[in-house]
Amino acid sequence: MSRSRLLIRLACAGVLLAVVAGPVLADSAPVTDKTNAVSVNPLALIFGGISANFEHKMNEKSSITAGFQYYSSDATFVKSTFLGVEGGYRMYFSPVAPDGFYWEPFVSVGSQSIEIDVFGSTGKGSGISFAPGVLVGRQWVWEGGFLIDLAIGGAFYLGGVTVDLGGSSYEGSYSGFGLAGKFALGYAWK
């Protein structure tokens, strides 16, 4: 992506955030009467992907979450696409779900396809990934429904990719602990 396109996307995201969030943030008292929320990661949108989440309040201290991710990159020698889903269970400390501090165990499952071009030979492959993890975060919900969700945590990533290139098959696997995080803007309603 060119630098000018990135700057244009950042400027558009900033203007959109100011237009939507400005009037809502003027009322800074958090509310707790919301039962559903949708949110997106604006950073994923800027870089050509999408990461969206849905949250449903189960009771005063917990909710369930479901997420969807799609990312695509086209580098010089490698093209890749990732499609994933995740589910989690949030437990809120205060004040009342879906507004406040929380911790969230989650599980993520994804599928990746890859195309590699090396010295005129093209290889294609795919793989599956699995990641159980936990996040600790804070979600702010305002009277108008605007929300901000920030979290950090970790996950244990397991996965592998098999690529067929030049008549041979190459396998790569990975496993280990890695950081996980969340930054999302969204809307909550009753």
Image (spheres, grey):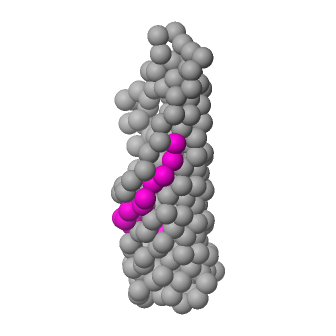
Confirm whether the magenta stretch covers residue 159. Answer: yes
Examine the rendering and report whether any part of residue 139 can be seen: yes
Q: Nearer the viewer, residue 151 or 163?
A: 163
Residue at point 47%, 42% (across, down): 173
In magenta, the rendered stretch is 147-160
Residue 181 in percent (x, y) is at 40, 60
Image position, residue 97 (x, y; %): 51, 83
Direction front: furthest residue: 168
In the image, residue 159 lies at what x, y percent? 51, 47
Tally of marks: 0
Left or right: 31 with respect to 164?
Answer: left
Name the quadrant containing residue 33: bottom right
In depth, the one of 84 and 43 nearer the eye is 84
Quadrant into which the C terminus falls: bottom right
Residue 80 seen in this snapshot? no
In the image, residue 31 above or below residue 21:
below
Front residue of 9/54: it is 54
102 within the magenta span: no
17 above or below 5? Answer: below
Name the residue: 48% across, 52% down. 158
Left or right: 109, with 178 as reference point:
right
Instruction: Give the residue drawn at x 49%, y 63%.
Output: 132
